[in-house]
Image: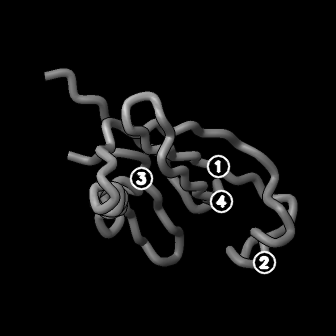
Amino acid sequence: MRHGPAVTRSGHERKTSLGELPSCHEQVIERMAAIDVTVSHAVEQLDARVISAQEAALLGVQRGSIVIVIRRTFYAEDRAVETAGIVVPTTRCEIVYETPYS
């Protein structure tokens, strides 16, 4: 079962669920536990925008390209404890969410 958005990179034929990248969620949970903070949940907000010049250079895409920005925030109950910004060019991604109901 996949959790979180999936990214496909054209040319590399690499398909990865962002929620399954080398235990990114587990790393945050473990880091927070080390300072006695219990992560209760995470929220992901998606937005589309034009890539910045710096991001275009780093990602090797043309200026003016559209990117999907995923802002993932981990919470300890109602308190935000860590936020990550993930920038993915739309030409290289497929975003898929799976929501289990049972």
What label does residue 89 carry, if any?
Answer: 4
* Of the image marks 4 and 3, the number of the one nearer the N terminus: 3
Q: Nearer the viewer, residue 42 or 94?
A: 42
Task: Kindly identify which residue carries mark 3.
Answer: 6
* Of the image marks 1 and 2, the number of the one nearer the N terminus: 2
Task: Kindly identify which residue carries mark 1.
Answer: 68
Residues under labels 4 and 3: Cα distance? 13 Å
Please name the amino acid that badge 4 sits on. Pro
Quadrant of the snapshot with the C terminus = top left
What SS does tag 2 mark?
Answer: helix
Q: Nearer the viewer, residue 1 or 94?
A: 1
- Rendering quarter of residue 62: bottom right
Residues under labels 4 and 1: Cα distance? 6 Å
Decide: few, some or many residues near mark 1? Use Cα within 10 Å; few <14, some 14-19, many ≥20: some
Residue occupying the point 22% across, 29% down = 100
Residue occupying the point 58% across, 62% down = 92
Residue occupying the point 35% across, 37% down = 41
Q: Nearer the viewer, residue 23 or 50?
A: 23
Residue 88, image x and y in percent? 61, 59
- Residues at marks 3 and 1 touching, judged by CB atoms closer than 8 Å: no
